[in-house]
Image: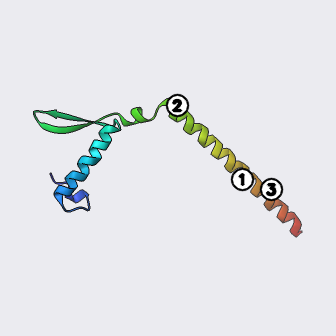
Amino acid sequence: MGLSPYFKERDEAALRRRLSGQMKRICELGMARLIKDAQGERYEILRIIKALVTAQVISRLKEELEQRLSSYQDYGGRRNSEAAADGEDEE
């Protein structure tokens, strides 16, 4: 297994342990599934976006983004008002 070009670690055994642990965690999160068959062990990557991002999550993100946009617009409006008031004072 030639993974060393893609990772900083040069110890193949340490790299395999690290990757094994990471893949186990990915499987626990429901993003992949370990398949054991006649070909050996391999992983099936599942549909991640559908599994992790539900309509409820998208709705919550939309609300958060709208709140941030509103606060940015309020801040920008205040800054413009202050700048205009400062310009009038200088005349």
User: In the figure, residue 49 lies in which quadrant?
Assistant: top left
Q: Earlier in the sequence, mark 3 or mark 2?
A: 2
Q: Foreground residue, 21 or 52?
A: 21
Question: Closer to us: mark 3 or mark 2?
Answer: 2
Q: Earlier in the sequence, mark 3 or mark 1?
A: 1
Name of the residue lying farthest toward the left: 38
Tell me which label, 1 or 2, sits earlier in the chain: 2
User: Residue 87: horizontal and vertical position, in percent?
Assistant: 83, 65
3 and 1 marks in contact (CB < 8 Å): no
- The secondary element bearing badge 3 is classed as helix
Residue receiving disc 2: 56
* The quarter of the displayed image where residue 60 is located: top right
Identity of the amino acid at label 2? Gln
* Closer to us: 5 or 14: 14
Tag 2's secondary structure? helix
Tell me the crowding category of disc 3: few under 14, some 14 to 19, or many 20 or more residues within 10 angstroms, Cα based. Answer: few
Q: Which residue is labeled 3 in the image?
A: 81
Task: Identify which residue is drawn at 22% across, 59% down.
Answer: 5
Q: Position of residue 68 (x, y in %)?
A: 63, 46
Horizontal arrangement in the rendering, residue 32 relative to residue 54 (left or right): left
Mark 1: secondary structure: helix
Q: What distance separates the C-alpha of mark 1 from that of mark 2?
A: 29 Å
